[in-house]
Amino acid sequence: MRGGLLAVPRGQGNAVNYASANMRLSTLPGAYAGSALAVHPEVVPIFLGSYGALRNEHVVALDITRMSTPGAASAIPSPSLGADAAFDADGNAPGAVAPDRLDMLEQAVERFDWVDLRGFAAHANAREAGQATTAVTLSIWYAGQRFCPSCGAPVKAAMGGWSQRCTNAGDGNRLLFPRIEPAVITAIVDSQDRLLLQHNSAWRNPLLYSVSAGFVEAGENLEHAARREAKEETGIDAVVTDLVAVTSSSRVITYANGDNTMYMDHSFLCALKPGGNAEPYVGDEESLNVGWFELDDLPEPLAASTVERLKLFRRYLDNKRRGDAHALFVADGVQR
């Protein structure tokens, strides 16, 4: 990985433009990569598991984001040099390192194609899509947290790349872990079997609607978060009646500000709170319009995420009518 991008074999980078094309991650022999790591302590190795069985192979991602390639900064000739003086006897720019003198990690920048996670995952098998998602997520965390949030000391990789360790012995060399923020999805249905939907202010299409959703805040449980989000965004007083589904996905959502997020959705079915407010209104700046819609006459288009979430609600309710009220557990679109 490098700067949030994934290395794929040379020539596969263009596969992102073709729906039926397959892609795979680039690999390096462990012995060669291990020797290169010895001279590049700034590279972060991330252990992603083992294949086991007869192969007995281990999968380790290498984050080379902070690795500097020798001579890269001086590879462009200075305008003050003449044409003959711009290169040495071997044809290299002054200070540059010939390609055959670079180690395997230094060559990787030019040796492979580089694609983003979203482009790769759509063309990869499930195993490599999962490995890539984990690796990129941890890489982004390393890029954003280079110092201990408690004391400000530099951090270093620990536990196979899955955590960081503060280098300040005086502060206990504390272990640091990436945080995963859970989200709540709230589908509120009233006594007339109408569904509450809202239009997000960030959407350009004025006809696009979705159910309420948001993140769990500090000190909240999931039920509290679902009720709070409904109240803040729509003004409705709701009570949670059912945990419908817990959904995880390897898909990374990238927002306009550059944040990369993976959701673990907790979907709740809610009813109106007896004696509470049942008339929706725009409660905060996140929404431009809210309202009740008949279940058999929902607006179009719905947000793609809402379409998928409503499928889970319908599946859950079908199961419940047959006597099975267990919540659904879904990972990467597959019910477990």
Image: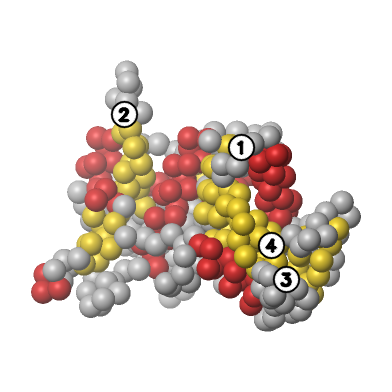
User: What's the distance in space between the residues labelled 2 and 4, CA to CA?
Assistant: 51 Å
Q: Amino acid at mark 4?
A: Ala
Can you tell which of label 2 and label 1 is closer to the viewer? 1
**Residue 162 visible to an observer of this rendering:** yes
The dot on residue 237 is: none
- Work out whether residue 112 or residue 81 is closer to the camera in this orientation and state it: 112
The residue at which mark 3 appears reads as 200
The residue at which mark 4 appears reads as 271
Task: Tell which circle, 2 or 4, labels the residue nearer the N-terminal end.
Answer: 2
Task: Tell which circle, 3 or 1, labels the residue nearer the N-terminal end.
Answer: 3
- Work out whether residue 166 or residue 88 is closer to the camera in this orientation and state it: 166
- Residue in view at x 55 percent, y 55 percent: 266
Snapshot quadrant of residue 212: bottom right
User: Tag 1: Cα neighbours inside 10 Å, few (<14), some, or many (≥20)?
Assistant: few
User: What's the distance in space between the residues labelled 2 and 1, CA to CA?
Assistant: 42 Å
State the residue lying farthest toward the right.
Answer: 297
User: What's the distance in space between the residues labelled 4 and 3, CA to CA?
Assistant: 22 Å
Residue 59 screen position, x and y as percent: 35, 37
- Residue in view at x 30 percent, y 52 percent: 161
Q: Amino acid at mark 3?
A: Asn
User: Tag 2: Cα neighbours inside 10 Å, few (<14), some, or many (≥20)?
Assistant: few
Q: Amino acid at mark 1?
A: Asp
Residue 333 screen position, x and y as percent: 60, 41
Task: Tell which circle, 2 or 1, labels the residue nearer the N-terminal end.
Answer: 2
Contact check, label 1 and label 4, Cβ < 8 Å:
no
Image vertical order of residue 322 relative to residue 277, above or below: above
The dot on residue 57 is: 2
User: What's the distance in space between the residues labelled 3 and 2, CA to CA?
Assistant: 47 Å
The residue at which mark 1 appears reads as 324
Q: Amino acid at mark 2?
A: Glu
Contact check, label 2 and label 4, Cβ < 8 Å:
no
